[in-house]
Image (spheres, rainbow, N blue to C red):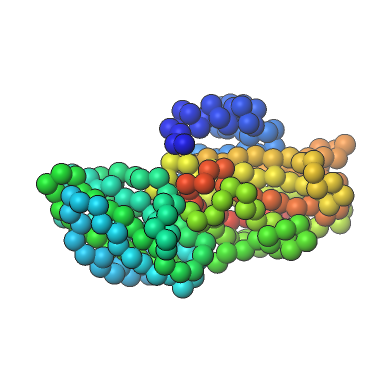
Amino acid sequence: MKYNRMGKVILMIAMSFMVFVNSEVAYASSLIVEDEQPDLEEEAQAKDVYYSLGKVTDAYKFYKVTVKNPGMLRIKFTGLNGNVKAALFDSQKIMLSSETTVKAAKPQATYYVGKTGTYFFRLKCAAGKTANAKYMFSKRIKLGGTTFAKADILKKGVKKSSIFGFEGSTSQKQYFKIKITNEELVRVKITKGNSCSDEDTVYIRIYKSNDKKNRVTWGWIYEGQGKATLYIRNSKNHKTIPGTYYIVLSKAFKTSGFDYSLTWLK
């Protein structure tokens, strides 16, 4: 099911008790979202190498690509007059993304994939129109453990980046772990990039090691938002009680994909 921007805002109200403060948005009371786009995608552009997919006509056609690493796939169109319908499929030609309309004003679409192997773009121009398509691939490292026991350690001041691919389900989670030896205010910065989907929403939960069922705090960052800082305030002094904590991330919608980074701020 697709949601427009207003629909997603309403959903976030119901799910996270969203409050507005001076035009900034806070999800739960401990996640402050900054209305600024991240630089995750731009970091790769200096090394972009494009490969031709061929001509796109007004009839649907599949275009095959193979990737050897998790990462970002970007498809770009030249000679576009009108628009192109584009969607990503897996190796069995099962649709992974919703179909998006690519317009001449911004003739490209971005997708993230978390598994190696074969994918297909399904493309079609508007009636009577044609265009040429090319694609590039930018490798991304996929981090985060698959369970609490396999959580990836997050150290203070060290950024860790990962992705959620279009092929992944909403039940798949990525786990990170931090250890607090003395009471302090823990702040974790989260930066999220966007794909061509309007459903790029990440769900963040914090658990303490002695209670993996009840969240200490949580939050959401939806498509179009760039950065957020999550505060863990569970002590009497509104700081963080010493112990081991888990940061658990997942995507809210199946037909989405994005990259992100985590930094435990000093």
Asked if 1 appears above or below 179 in the picture, the reply is: above
Whether residue 172 is visible to the viewer of this picture, yes or no, is: yes
Residue in the image at 42% along x and 61% along y: 92
Residue in the image at 52% along x and 46% along y: 254
Whether residue 41 is visible to the viewer of this picture, yes or no, is: no
Residue in the image at 15% along x and 44% along y: 127
- The answer to which quarter of the image holds residue 73 is bottom left
Asked if 22 appears above or below 32 in the picture, the reply is: above
- Residue 209 drawn at (x, y percent): 83, 52
Residue in the image at 62% along x and 61% along y: 159
- Residue 156 drawn at (x, y percent): 72, 59
**Looking at the image, which is closer to me, 64 or 155?**
64
Left or right of 76 in this view: 35 = right
Left or right of 254 in this view: 160 = right
**Looking at the image, which is closer to me, 243 or 258?**
258
- Residue 52 drawn at (x, y percent): 25, 68
